[in-house]
Image (tube, helix red, strand yellow):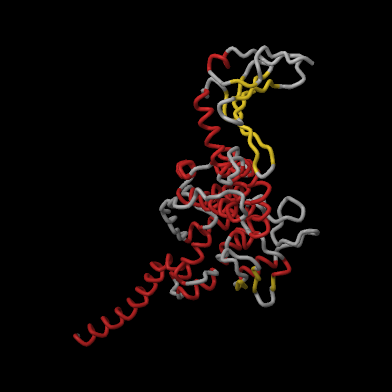
Amino acid sequence: MTDPSPLPRRFKFSTKVIEGLPPNPRDSRSTDMEYTDTEVAGLKLLVSKNGRKFFFFRYTYRGVKRATKLGEFGSLGVTEARKLALAIRYRVDQGEDPQAEKVQQRAVPLLRDFALEEYLSHARQHKRTAAWDESKLRIHILPRLGAQRLDAITAREIERYHADIKALRCAATANRHLALLSRLFKLAVQWGRTPRNPCLGIKKFREAGAPIRALAAADVERLIQAMDAEQNPVVAAALKLLLLTGLRKEEVLRAKWEHLDLERATLFLPTTKSGRSRTAVLNAAAVALLQQQSRREGNAYIFPGHIRGQPIINPSKPWRRILAAAGITEHLRIHDLRHHFASVLANEGVSLDIIAQLLGHRSTQTTRIYAHWADSALRRASDVVSTSVTRALQAEAD
C-alpha cells in the first residue's frame, strides 16, 4: 500500500506541524502512524485513526528494544517531550532501565487481591481469629481501600480510616482494625509485594477500660430463671456454664466432648486467648450442668449449633431475649458473666493468684482489675479483728 502520509515520517517536531498532522487513515494496516523527531534520537509521535497524538520514546536496553509513553500531545508540549526523552536517555546511558519501576508497580497487587488471595490464606493457618479478620475486611476495609494498590495507600488514609472506625464503633474496635491492617502490610512487605507499611508510626487510640460489673444476687436469680425459660436450651446451658466457670465465651462454645472429664471435673482447653492450652477446673454445679447435656450425632461439640457439625456461633439474640426476660435494661455483655465470676471470688477473699489461675490469666497483673473487691474482702476480715479488739478494750475499761 502506498504511504498515505503527505508529510515525511522524519522531521523536526514543532507544535505547528504536529497540529496539522491528519489522523491515520481508516484503511491503514497499522493502528497508528509513527513520526520521528530529527532533533532528539528516539523521540516518536504516534497519531491514531481518531486523530489522537501521543509522544513515545524508543530505546534499547541490554539488547532489548523498548518504548515508554511520555504523554499526549496538547497536555505535553514538544519542548517538554524532548526533555523527558533526554532524561530517559541519560538513565539508559547510566545503566538503568526506565521501565523497571513501572514493571515493579504493575506487580504490586490491589489491597483486595492481596487480602483475599494471600493474607487470609495465611491467617487461616496461623490465627484463631481469621474469621474475624475476614469479617473486618469484607464489611469495612475492602469497600473503603480494596480497589487501591498496596503501594498507593498512604499513612494519612489509614489514619482517616482508623478515626472513622472509632467514630462508628469505639476506640478499642478501631485499634483492632489498625492492628489487622498493620499485620497485613507487614506480611506484604515481608513477601516482597509492596515496599512499605503505611501503618507504621500511627498511634493507637487510648482505650477506656470497660466498667467491671458485679451482678447483684437478685440479678443473678432473675438471669437464671430467664435462662431456664429460654426457647433455646442449648444456648441457655452454655451461658449458665459461663456464669459458673468464668471461662471465655469461645472456650465454652468450642468445648468438645472429647476434652471433658466429668470424673475429674475438668475441661481441657486446647486453644486459649494466650495461645496456650490449659485445663479448667469445674465446680459441682458446672459438672451437674454438663451431665444434663445430650450428645448430638455427628457433632463433636458440647453445645452444638444449628449447622451440622458446628458449635453455637453467635448467641447474641438469645442473650438479648434472656436479658429482656430478666428485666435487666442496663447494658450487660456476655463477657460480664466472666467478670461476675471473678468479682464473687475476690469479694469472698480468694487471692488474686488463685483467681488468675481459674481465669487462665498468664499473670496476676491482668487480674488486678478485681483488686478493689479483694481489698474489700481484706478490709472486712480486718474489721473482724478490729471489732474483737474493741470489745476487749471496752470490757477492760468496764
**Percent position (x, y) of residue 341?**
51, 65
Front in this rendered view, residue 105 or 398: 105
Residue 198 visible in this rendered orientation of the protein: yes
Image coordinates of residue 209 in percent, x first then y, are 43, 56
Which residue of the protein is positioned furthest toward the left in this rendering?
397
The spot of residue 203 in percent (x, y) is 43, 52
Report whether 194 appears left or right of 355: right
Q: Quadrant of the C terminus?
A: bottom left
Figure quadrant of the N terminus: top right
Of all residues, the one furthest to the bottom in this rendering is 396
- Which image quarter: residue 109? top right
In the displayed structure, 398 sits above or below 49; it is below
Q: Nearer the viewer, residue 173 or 255?
A: 173
Q: How many marks?
A: 0
Look at the picture and state if 340 lies above or below 183: below
Regarding residue 327, the answer to whether it shows in the image is no
Q: Nearer the viewer, residue 226 or 38?
A: 38
Q: Position of residue 222 (x, y in %)?
A: 53, 55
Is 22 placed above or below 329 here?
above
Q: Is residue 349 left or right of residue 140?
A: left
Q: In the drawing, does residue 36 fall left or right of residue 372?
A: right
Q: Is 95 drawn above or below residue 219 in the view shown?
A: above
